[in-house]
Every structure is written in structure tokens, then in C-alpha cells.
């Protein structure tokens, strides 16, 4: 398979970036998208051209590092996958593929296709934890009964990997889906009630400080989320925030 790659190149966050065109051959349909980029970088090194910088780690759809905008879609044309799970059989011989970093003021470009998503870390640090008494014997797992429905919803919210696709898909670059997932995974469980008020106020405040946009409920975030995080979490976040604000 021959492809024309239109890739965003940017030396650093302060540099003026631009698209560069690269032609690549002998790409097999069973390759992952990141393996294809590996082949390209090997080719560029042989041609004494600086390789393309992109993020990756586990390559198993778990770490959330491979944040690429492919032909205008976060993680590419497939649904419920990360970029590393996208295979080249989704493209045809001769295709032009446009590859760029996630676009958001809160996700500044580090270099080429790599962005700084540490804003998510700071939101998590603002309230994504619970108080646990670690002294004495560990409690049995079933000592605190939890309704299965709530446990399932909390688990589903906790599957968020913080990749940033929700932000890239949103016309406002909102982080509401991410933040609501991190709030929900505790709000649904009795262990999370201790910091409930402080948690939602602090996390939303940090989200606003990071410069993310507002949510206008277009739903693009849920569609592009590789883990299928539901918009119901945003509704829960709004309820938690209103309740916490009234208590304050």
C-alpha cells in the first residue's frame, strides 16, 4: 500500500508549525497506525530527516498516550479505539492521510504530534482521590455493600484513560467528559462521599483554570471516546456541582 502522509511538523510550542508531505510504500493492512509511523520514521532517519515526534507507550489501548487527529477525527475513523488500535486496512492504496496533534489551548504542542496533556493530571490531583484509613487490618471487600448498578456505573466511569479525545472532538475544547468521569467514579460509591463537596468544586475550578472551554452538549465527546464514557456523567457532575455550591 502506498500512502501520502500530510503531517504537522512543529519544532516546539513557540515555533510556527506547518504540514509536510511524505510518501510511504510497502504498508500492510495488518499494521497498526503507530507501526506505520515507525516505518515512516525509519525511512526519514535513512534520508537524514528528523523523525516525526509522536506519543506512545503501551500500544494496547490502555495508556491514552497516542493522541492523534487523523483526517479530522481523534484516533481516526474507527470507534471505541485508540490510535494504536487503528489498523491500516481502514485506508486504501493511494490515500492521503492528514495527521495532526489534538488541538486545544490547554494541550500545547510539545513537538510535532506530541501535546502536553498535564492539565488532565492537575485536574485529577485537585480532587481525584479518597481518604482511606490505612492503620490496622484491611477491611474485607464486601464489608460495605454497594448496589450493583452503582458499582457498574462507577467502574465504567473509571475506564477513562485520559487520552484527551473528548477535548479534541469538542468544538469548545471542553474537558467536561473527562472531569465528570473522574468525579463520577467516586460520587457513585460510599467511599467517595467524604470529599464529595470539596472534590467537585476543586476539580471544576482547576478545569476552568486550565483554560478548557464550556460544554454545550453536542455529544461529540462521547462518540469519539475510545472507552465510550457516557454523557450521563456530565449530568451527574452538574448535579454534584450544584449540590456542592449550595452547601458552600
Image (spheres, rainbow, N blue to C red):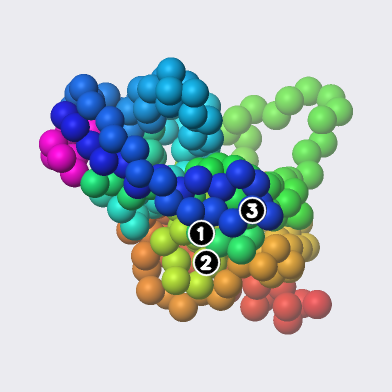
| Residue 80 located within the stretch drawn in magenta | no
Give the spatial CA distance, label 1 vs label 2: 8 Å
Circle on res. 71: none
Tag 2 residue: 173
Q: x, y (%) of residue 212?
A: 61, 67
Frontmost of labels 1 and 2 is 1
- Over which residues does the magenta segment extend? 88-95
Circle on res. 103: 1
Tag 3 residue: 15
Asked if residue 139 can be seen in this view, the reply is yes
Query: CB under 8 Å between callouts 3 and 1?
Result: no
Q: x, y (%) of residue 208?
A: 69, 69
Residue drawn at 38 percent across, 22 percent down: 43
Viewer-nearest residue: 55 or 53 = 53
* The N terminus: image quadrant: top left
Query: CB under 8 Å between callouts 1 and 2?
Result: yes
Q: On the rendered structure, is 44 left or right of 116? A: left
Amino acid at each position: 500500500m502506498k500512502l501520502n502522509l500530510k503531517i504537522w511538523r512543529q519544532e516546539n510550542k513557540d515555533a510556527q508549525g506547518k504540514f509536510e508531505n511524505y510518501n510511504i510504500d510497502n504498508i500492510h493492512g495488518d499494521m497498526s497506525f503507530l507501526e506505520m509511523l515507525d516505518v515512516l520514521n525509519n525511512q526519514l532517519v535513512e534520508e537524514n530527516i528528523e523523525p516525526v515526534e509522536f506519543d506512545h507507550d503501551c500500544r494496547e489501548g490502555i495508556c491514552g498516550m497516542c493522541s492523534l487527529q487523523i483526517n479530522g477525527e481523534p484516533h481516526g475513523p474507527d470507534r471505541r479505539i485508540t490510535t494504536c488500535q487503528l489498523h491500516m486496512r481502514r485506508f486504501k492504496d493511494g490515500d492521503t492521510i492528514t495527521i495532526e496533534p489534538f488541538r486545544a489551548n490547554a494541550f500545547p504542542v510539545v513537538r510535532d504530534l506530541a501535546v502536553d496533556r498535564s492539565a488532565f493530571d492537575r485536574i485529577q490531583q485537585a480532587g481525584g482521590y479518597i481518604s482511606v484509613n490505612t492503620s490496622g487490618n484491611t477491611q474485607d471487600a464486601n464489608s460495605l455493600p454497594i448496589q450493583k448498578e452503582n458499582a457498574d456505573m462507577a467502574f465504567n466511569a473509571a475506564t477513562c484513560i485520559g487520552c484527551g479525545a473528548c477535548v479534541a472532538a469538542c468544538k469548545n475544547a471542553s474537558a467536561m467528559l473527562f472531569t465528570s468521569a473522574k468525579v463520577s467514579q467516586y460520587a457513585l460509591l460510599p467511599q467517595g462521599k467524604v470529599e464529595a463537596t470539596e472534590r467537585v468544586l476543586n476539580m471544576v475550578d482547576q478545569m476552568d483554570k486550565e483554560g478548557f472551554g464550556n460544554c454545550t452538549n453536542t455529544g461529540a465527546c462521547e462518540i469519539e471516546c475510545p472507552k465510550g464514557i457516557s454523557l450521563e456523567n456530565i449530568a451527574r457532575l452538574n448535579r454534584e456541582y450544584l449540590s456542592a455550591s449550595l452547601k458552600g
